[in-house]
Image (spheres, helix red, strand yellow):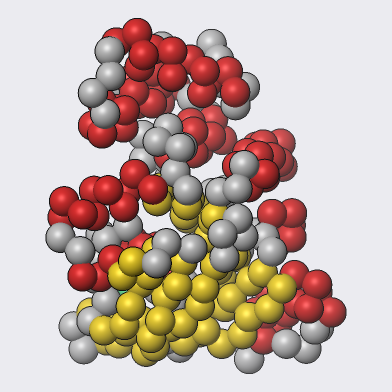
Amino acid sequence: MIEVIGFKKSFGTKQVHKGVTFDVKKGECLGLIGGSGTGKSVILRSLIGLEKPDSGKIIIDGVDITKMNERELLEIRKKVAYAFQNGALFDSMTVFENLAYPLREHFHLSEKEIKDRVHDQLADFGLEGNEFVYPGNLSGGMQKRVGLVRAMMMNPQVILYDEPTAGLDPFNTKKIQDLILRLKSRGVTSILVTHDMPTANAVCDKMAMLSQGRIEAQGNMAQLNQDERGAIAKFISGEEF
Ligand SMILES: Nc1ncnc2c1ncn2[C@@H]1O[C@H](COP(=O)(O)OP(=O)(O)OP(=O)(O)O)[C@@H](O)[C@H]1O
Ligand SMILES: [Mg+2]
């Protein structure tokens, strides 16, 4: 479903990605880890065409999106949703309007259809009763959940999660894990950028670690949990490698 091949990108004189290659199969969840500034968020942004690599390919569902124009990228953004780190809700809009926004942007639906879709989605994810609340009056955990639910309004085939549990208490972390697992059970393909290993263990099929511009190590969860001296185990335990 996703293939990143030889992804290279520099900002000014600093080469952040020196040839990053990985793939995610349909229905899989890849955990992407790596130190701060290794370029995880840039890769996620590139997967929806908000950034372009200097060279390399990004193939989504068989098509290289690095060659696409803005109009074609809009179609990709219906298929691939990006759940921003902070939820990125619009503060001046209620929860209802935040969830209605992507529908209004991408489809020509009647008010009744929009209302039904938003209410169904809120009920489906246990968030009913919050329609008329403004994001500023929601807890951080609730904001993130609403952010994820908004990312899913378009029924995307792919969801990119950028540190969805960072800073959350165990209850809200569990809620987010459940949400990710629900989507996975529906066949959604995903990439999860995280430092939260319990969450990665709960939802990911495999992990890849970015270091010095490349994928330093990767493997499925069983392999990684056995490989105590591997680069990923060292990274997680805070050791230098
Ligand atoms: N638009 C930009 N202009 C200049 N430099 C940028 C830009 N976007 C990213 N960078 C640089 O690219 C590097 C990678 O950034 P990125 O945000 O992808 O890191 P990250 O792995 O997501 O880090 P973190 O774990 O802290 O979120 C950083 O050094 C950052 O400063
Ligand atoms: Mg980041």
Residue 95, located in which quarter of the rendered image? top left
**For the C terminus, which image quadrant?**
bottom right
Tell me if 197 is positioned left or right of 65 in this view.
Answer: right
Q: Residue furthest top?
A: 112
Q: Residue at x 73, y 87 (%)?
A: 230
The location of residue 193, given as percent across then percent down, is 53, 62
Q: Residue furthest right?
A: 226
When the figure is inspected, residue 64 is found, relative to residue 98, above or below; the finding is: below
Observer-nearest of 162 and 79: 79
The location of residue 41, given as percent across then percent down, is 40, 64
Tell me if 217 is positioned left or right of 9 in this view.
Answer: right
Q: Residue at x 69, y 64 (%)?
A: 205
Residue 240, located in which quarter of the rendered image? bottom right
The location of residue 113, given as percent across then percent down, is 36, 14
The location of residue 81, given as percent across then percent down, is 40, 47
Total marks shown come to 0
Q: Residue furthest front?
A: 62
When the figure is inspected, residue 96 is found, relative to residue 204, above or below; the finding is: above
Observer-nearest of 96 and 237: 96
Tell me if 144 is positioned left or right of 11 in this view.
Answer: right
Q: Residue at x 62, y 60 (%)?
A: 28
When the figure is inspected, residue 176 is found, relative to residue 68, above or below; the finding is: above
